[in-house]
Amino acid sequence: MSEDYRVRIGALIRDARRHKGLTQAELAKLLATSQSAVARIEQGQQNLSLETLARIGEALDSEFVSVGHSGPQHLRIVGGQELSGEIAVKSSKNAGVALLCASLLNRGRTTIRGLARIEEVNRILEVLTSIGVKTRWLPDSNDLEIVPPAVLDLASIDVEAARRTRTVIMFLGPLLHDHASFRLPYAGGCDLGTRTIEPHMSALQHLGLTVEATHGFYAATSQPQVSTQRIVLTERGDTVTENVLMAAARIPGTTEIRNASPNYMVQDLCFFLQTLGVQIDGIGTTTLRVTGVPEIDVDVEFAPSEDPIEAMSLLAAAVVTGSRITIRRVPIEFMEIEIATLETMGMRLEISPEYPSANGKTRLVDLTTIPGPLHAALDKIHPMPFPGLNIDNLPFFALIAATAQGTTMIHDWVYDNRAIYLTELNRVGAKVQLLDPHRVLIEGPTRWRAAEMQCPPALRPGVVVLLAMLAAPGTSVLRNVYVINRGYEDLAERLNKLGATIDVFRDI
């Protein structure tokens, strides 16, 4: 390994360690080495074997080396180019992974139509395969067929894959029906600070599931019974609502869920459960009444709806590059507050008549962006539970605010760390001032500049940086983009079809 290469790898390791919030001493402990050795590595003063690089990558959840593995690792972006054309929104990541978990309720064949082929889905498929579920992509399509075994082999669960996704927490609801006791690895996913599963535990306890966190696993015991429960969720969370829905789906009787999330992925899950024969009233409201059925053995097909977060990403791409593009298949019900907020900032859009998604329920439109100057929002921009501004769309408003005239406050009250990641925009020319772990001030407009940097370890901030690089004249490099691939299918290729220049490459 050349000295120049050692320095570059060392800088990447240092940045990844800082993103994880680890000291050199803490990383050294994970690697069973000394702090001085970590310091030498980060300073580019030590040769590294492929095995050592792989161990460091595992400890930091970053890819520094990949052998025999397909898919992008780094992106090289030539920015400052206007985009044009049409692009269709793909199906929802969050709905798709919920449906994968819900397929465990069904002893029959489940076919999910138009499922996004993303890394988050891949991790769940690895987990499902490890416990005996047969999955296959149908030829030349994004349709996935799922056939469960007679008995799940939970003892063989792929622990590494499970720990790379937070979705595994949604196995609790489906598994409680046929397993008196089981263990699940701690959930992973984005690095967004403390995200407790206490709401899951307290809600599922009403339906007979007890969970204890111990030694890197959730140890669960289950005694489900006929339900006449009224469960009040302590937070209106999407995944906790989905977990309780899946738990109630096969418990005879009626379970009433109060303070339920009515968000897009919850609605898609409800529609899917209805195809399985589960009766659900109140879809789209904060009170759901679920009448469960003890056994489900049917062959079903279902198509998750389009992703409003991807739609917002594409809208932000148009704004930051000053482009006129048409974004097709936008789930308008879940974008209305975002669009209304943009219109108060001076955004102009052409909106087509509504038409149905493949699920027959979700309302879609086509949006065409009209370039023009924006001004800062009059009030702070902050998320709220649906029908408010979606928490996952908030980071894109930081990017849009950086193009607008004036100063905007972004308040991310939900996550502990994500506002901090928005300061990464400073490295490509933005003026982002961190007020505290939840609030930033953004002054625009921005003179974007090219940069080479590590991708933030959270999905939406990672995409925000990528889109900023599209606006920056010159060549930028965004390294270790696995987190982006968790939620977006072929994003670089699809943006290139609009006129972007993004190359996917690997160092090794």
Image: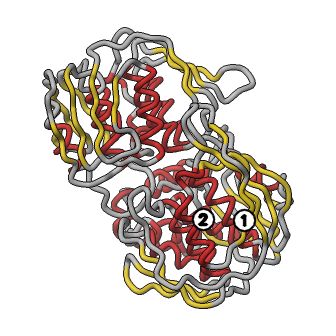
Residue 477 visible in the snapshot: yes
Left or right position of 369 against 176: right
Q: In which quarter of the image is the N terminus?
A: bottom right
Mark 1 closeness class: few <14, some 14–19, many ≥20 residues within 10 Å: some
- Find residue 66 and report its horizontal and vertical position in percent: 63, 46
Q: Which residue is drawn at 49% across and 56% down?
A: 56
Q: In this view, does 63 lie above or below 141?
A: below
**In the displayed structure, does residue 90 sit left or right of residue 393?**
right
Q: Label 1, on which residue?
A: 349
Compared to 207, does 483 lie above or below? below
Height in image: 370 above or below 329? below
Secondary structure of the residue carrying numbered label 2: helix
**The one of 1 and 90 positioned closer to us in this rendering:** 90
Query: Which badge, 1 or 2, comes first in the chain's sequence?
Result: 2
Q: Do the residues labelled 1 and 2 touch (CB within 8 Å)?
A: yes
Few, some or many C-alpha atoms within 10 Å of disc 2 (few <14, some 14-19, many ≥20)? some
Indicate the amino acid at tag 1.
Leu
To which residue does mark 2 refer? 339
Q: Residue 433 carries which label?
A: none
Give the x, y percent position of residue 428.
Answer: 67, 79
Q: Position of residue 158 (x, y in %)?
A: 41, 31
Q: Nearer the viewer, residue 271 or 201?
A: 271
Tag count: 2
